[in-house]
Amino acid sequence: MFYRVETNLWTVVKGNTVKCLLCPHECLVREGETGLCRTRTNREGVLYSVAYGNPCSVAVDPVEKKPLYHFLPGTEILSLATAGCNLHCLNCQNWPISQVSPLSLQSYDMLPRQVAEMAVSCHVPSIAFTYTEPTVFYEYMFDSAVLAREKGLKTVAVSNGYINLEPLAALIPYLDAANIDLKCFDDKLYRRLTGGRLQPVLDSLLALLGAGVWIEITHLVIPGVTDDPVQFESMCRWLAENGFEAVPLHISRFFPCYKLQDLDHTPLESITRARDIALGCGLKFVYPGNVSSDKENHTRCPGCGRVVVERDHYTLAGLHLTKGSCNYCGATVQGLW
């Protein structure tokens, strides 16, 4: 489906060339061409999305798999994606669907109304826009989120955070939670690893936090690339100093894939070291990801230190909270429980 993009998200710059205003790339798209995301195309001087109503992947997942540990734990979430992405990460796990056009893959016919209806029929409380980058199917995500809200469903964006602030602000009233992938804390490295820049991601994090959207952050530790402890500490200090001390940080282990298959997997000691640094910087909830041991994946009360959410991989094994308060000491444990 070719879906005409609202004019506030693009502008004509010369002749039939248009500038897309959705993300910080702000691609100049000539007639007949597409932007870097492969989802927005110029037809006769008008910008269209080819990522609307055509998800390439639809599944019901544990919400913990997003990962979201402080958002409706123990529930399932309807997850969907179209093809395409506005970053080109060298380590992308989903490159067969993220680095191609929606027109090149087999897809489902599923309009926003059907997305909300499927969530209701599956008896899940929320919908996640995930797997690829939901920014590039913005209109589809937006309309689905509006209809989901009408049916009492919650919505989640699992995103790289690479979106301009105006479209993000329009989406936020219909967004309940987000997991943002903060890939590193150096702009040159961000450009080399992803093709994007660091500051727009930080701006998105601040906008989401300021609007009260529940946020969790994922950071992948890649050996020889994003495992510098000094840079990681700078990132954690920035988070602590800018109001993210209670935002869960998921420190994930890298396994060779896509264009980084020549690298080794992340040593477990690197994950442990990063977790210790994050806690030392004042972050309250730090979880290892992609590791076989779950001993550090339980949530501990920041007041008394006792385990209040027990997990067995992606399964909720115990919940010792009442309306967000610790059953043992009464302290508040931040999240949407």
Image (tube, grey):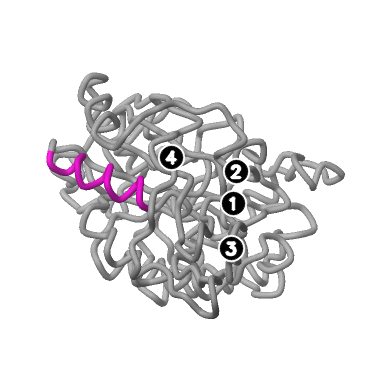
Q: Quick check: 116 left or right of 277?
A: left
Q: Which mark is residue 38?
A: 1
Prevailing secondary structure of the magenta residues: helix
Residue placed under numbered mark 3 in the picture: 31
**In terms of depth relative to the viewer, which is nearer, 128 or 220?**
128
Residues under labels 1 and 4: Cα distance? 14 Å
- Secondary-structure class at tag 1: loop
Q: Which mark is residue 194?
A: none
- Secondary-structure class at tag 3: loop
- In the rendered structure, which disc, 2 or 1, sits on the residue that comes first in sequence? 1
For the residues carrying marks 4 and 3, which lies nearer the camera in this image? Answer: 3
- In the rendered structure, which disc, 1 or 4, sits on the residue that comes first in sequence? 4
Residues under labels 3 and 1: Cα distance? 14 Å
- In the rendered structure, which disc, 2 or 3, sits on the residue that comes first in sequence? 3
Q: Is residue 40 above or below residue 265?
A: below
Circles 2, 1 touching at the beta carbon (< 8 Å): yes
Q: Residue at x 45, y 70 (%)?
A: 21
